Amino acid sequence: MSFFEENCPEMDRYLENHASAEPEILKRLRKETFQKTTQPHMISGYQQGRLLSILSKMMQPKSVLEIGTFTGYATLCLAEGLAENGKITTLDVNEELAYLPKKYFAESEFSEKINFRLQDAKDFLKETEEVFDLVFIDADKENYAEYFRLIKPKVKSGSVIMFDNVLWYGKVLEENPKQQSTKKIKELNDLVAQDTDFENLILPLRDGVNLIRKI
């Protein structure tokens, strides 16, 4: 949930009313996510989805990696900008929920471009030799710093990496956080800010997106 959703719903509605329309398939997926999952707030949602779509369309990536599929909302947004021969590999470990993204991937116009895998992301990154144009991570926060270390050799100059939830409901401002997830998000943000191979900006959209570009 974003700061505005929690503190200023009128502003949040204004932002949505002045953004590009959400495709019909995403409206249905968002509705079913709220009906059938116990943590529907994990979905990327309207505003963030349009950010992912626009960025993907600007880049027209040939190879996209997503870590953390959930119900597939962000996957479909990222797929909107794929190059003609492009593909997106999306990873998750939740077997019980896998039926939902599979259903919507099959319905979408991007079905042939989506490679949905039930696999641990760290194992995948250690095994793959693929180089990615665009990477989006919205998964277990405790592994964020490790994901960054493993992804670094899998991107090239001009590639973009995005980490979601990097403000962690404002907990990143805690000097001595007790939660391991908060510690790891702060570690990630520090790693990125200090790495001279990248340039970045944290966008205060929803719960914070660290937008990172390989120099």
Image (cartoon, rainbow, N blue to C red):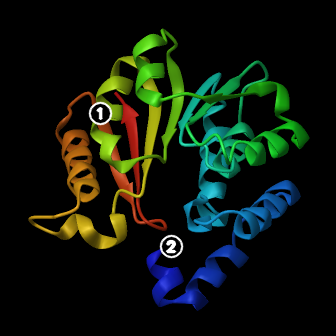
Kind of element beneath mark 2: loop
| Residue kind at label 2, given as amino acid type | Met
Mark 1 neighbour density, 10 Å: few (under 14) some (14–19) many (20 or more): some
Quarter of the image for residue 91 reads top right
Q: Which mark is residue 146?
A: 1
CA distance for labels 2 and 1: 25 Å
| Residue kind at label 1, given as amino acid type | Glu
Left or right: 4 with respect to 144? right
**Residue 21, visible in the rendered structure:** no
Q: Which residue is mark 2?
A: 1
Question: Which mark is first along the chain, 1 or 2?
Answer: 2
Could you tell me residue 55's position as x and y percent? 59, 44
Could you tell me residue 36's position as x and y percent? 74, 64
Determine the residue positioned at 36% across, 71% down: 169
Left or right: 151 with respect to 4? left
Determine the residue positioned at 64% across, 40% down: 95
Where is 92 relative to 127, above or below? below
Could you tell me residue 73's position as x and y percent? 69, 51
